[in-house]
Image (tube, rainbow, N blue to C red):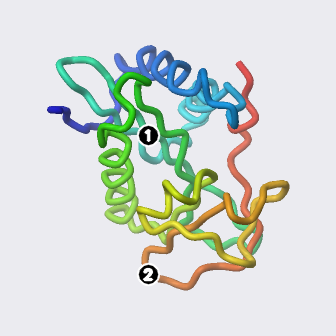
């Protein structure tokens, strides 16, 4: 496994779209709109972090991070996702490498923290935890997790950018 992680480039956009669609195609807990969400975030200027894992000029993984809104108005919080790895390359450490690089980039930018909606078993490996008082409406508490980069964890309702409603 010999891949590099770098910022997305304009020539990567179509490949990121196809990779994301393929990565979520068989996921039962997916809306199957993740590729549209990334495009909508990009078009809205809301992709704070967009990294690709590249091996032999093939994009094998991608991660997106965008700002979220907290009900208290607390600034500096972001939402991780979607994160995608080619189905034939899943389980080989690409997603973990993308996660670590994306979280490090957020910290370098001075972010207060990051939230994620997903499997606690997976995201817990990176320090994400569910916290009482921090919620995403309509989502079971244990699947909405946060990682603070040093400050207090807010007790708030979180809202993702409207791009997460994109369906095409």
List the residue tagged with mark 2.
150
Which residue is at 49% across, 83% downward?
151
Horizontally, is 77 left or right of 135 in the view?
A: left
Residue 168 percent coordinates (x, y):
71, 18
Which residue is at 37% across, 38% downward?
91
Which residue is at 70% across, 38% downward?
164
Circle 2 Cα neighbour tier, 10 Å, few/some/many (<14 / 14–19 / ≥20): few
Residue 148 percent coordinates (x, y):
50, 74
Q: Quadrant of residue 130?
A: bottom right
**SS for tag 1?**
strand
- Spatial CA distance of label 1 from label 2 is 23 Å
Find residue 40 and name its label.
none
Horizontally, is 32 left or right of 8 in the view?
A: right
Find residue 63 and name its label.
1
For the N terminus, the quadrant is top left
Q: Quadrant of residue 62?
A: top left
Q: In the rendered structure, which disc, 1 or 2, sits on the residue that comes first in sequence?
A: 1
**SS for tag 2?**
loop
Residue 39 percent coordinates (x, y):
57, 26
Horizontally, is 116 left or right of 1 in the view?
A: right
In the displayed structure, 15 sits above or below 81; it is: above
Which residue is at 37% across, 65% downward?
107
């Amino acid at each position: 496994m010999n891949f590099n992680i770098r910022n997305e480039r304009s020539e990567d956009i179509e490949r990121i779209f196809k990779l994301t669609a393929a990565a979520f195609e068989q996921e039962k807990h997916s809306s199957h709109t993740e590729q549209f969400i990334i495009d909508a975030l990009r078009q809205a200027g809301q992709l704070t972090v967009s990294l690709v894992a590249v091996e032999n000029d093939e994009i094998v993984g991608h991660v997106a991070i965008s700002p979220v809104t907290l009900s208290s108005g607390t600034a500096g919080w972001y939402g991780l996702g979607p994160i995608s790895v080619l189905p034939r390359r899943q389980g080989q450490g690409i997603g973990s490498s993308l996660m670590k690089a994306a979280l490090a980039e957020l910290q370098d930018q001075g972010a207060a923290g990051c939230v994620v909606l997903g499997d606690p078993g997976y995201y817990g490996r990176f320090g994400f935890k569910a916290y009482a008082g921090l919620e995403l409406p309509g989502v079971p508490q244990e699947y909405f997790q946060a990682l603070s980069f040093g400050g207090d964890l807010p007790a708030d309702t979180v809202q993702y950018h409207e791009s997460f409603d994109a369906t095409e």
